[in-house]
Amino acid sequence: MKTESGKKWNELAQAYSGMAADRESDAYEYDINFPSILNLIPKNKISVLDVGTGSGDFIPYFEKYFEDIEGCDV
């Protein structure tokens, strides 16, 4: 993004991605959020759309449970 707000958004996204990729610094995402999300998805589903996927850090975890995973974000 070329606008000032776009630049700030990219900085924030990069900082979040670095934190979310590190299980030690963001255990809440891995130990609370991800299991909670899995519980909301019906067990018979084979496809998942991860809306707001960011850098896609959770895609490898979804691959353990579903055959087809797509992610999208700004």
Image (cartoon, rainbow, N blue to C red):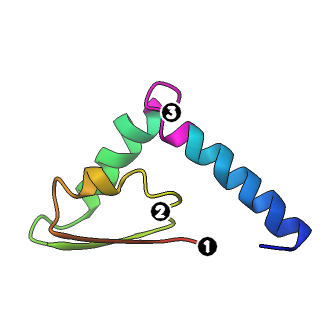
Q: Residues within 10 Å of mark 3 (few under 14, many from 20)?
A: some
x, y percent for residue 29: 44, 41
Outermost residue, top side: 24
x, y percent for residue 31: 35, 35
Q: Is residue 23 magenta?
A: yes
Alpha carbon distance from label 3 to label 2: 16 Å
Image position of 30 (left or right of 18): left
Local secondary structure at mark 2: loop
Disc 3 target residue: 26
Alpha carbon distance from label 3 to label 1: 22 Å
Alpha carbon distance from label 2 to label 1: 9 Å
| Residue at image coords 88%, 73% | 3
Tell me which amino acid carries mark 3: Asp
- Magenta-tinted stretch: 19-27
x, y percent for residue 66: 17, 64
Residue 3 versus residue 15 in the image, above or below: below
Outermost residue, right side: 4
- Quarter in which the C terminus is drawn: bottom right
Dominant secondary structure (helix, strand or loop) of the stretch shown in magenta: loop
Outermost residue, front side: 2
Local secondary structure at mark 3: loop
Q: Are marks 3 and 1 in contact (CB under 8 Å)?
A: no
Q: Residues within 10 Å of mark 2 (few under 14, many from 20)?
A: some
Sequence-first tag of 3 and 2: 3
Sequence-first tag of 2 and 1: 2
Q: Is residue 48 magenta?
A: no
Residue 23 versus residue 49 in the image, above or below: above
Q: Residues within 10 Å of mark 1 (few under 14, many from 20)?
A: few
Q: Are marks 2 and 1 in contact (CB under 8 Å)?
A: no
The tag on residue 74 is 1
Disc 2 target residue: 53
| Residue at image coords 51%, 66% | 52
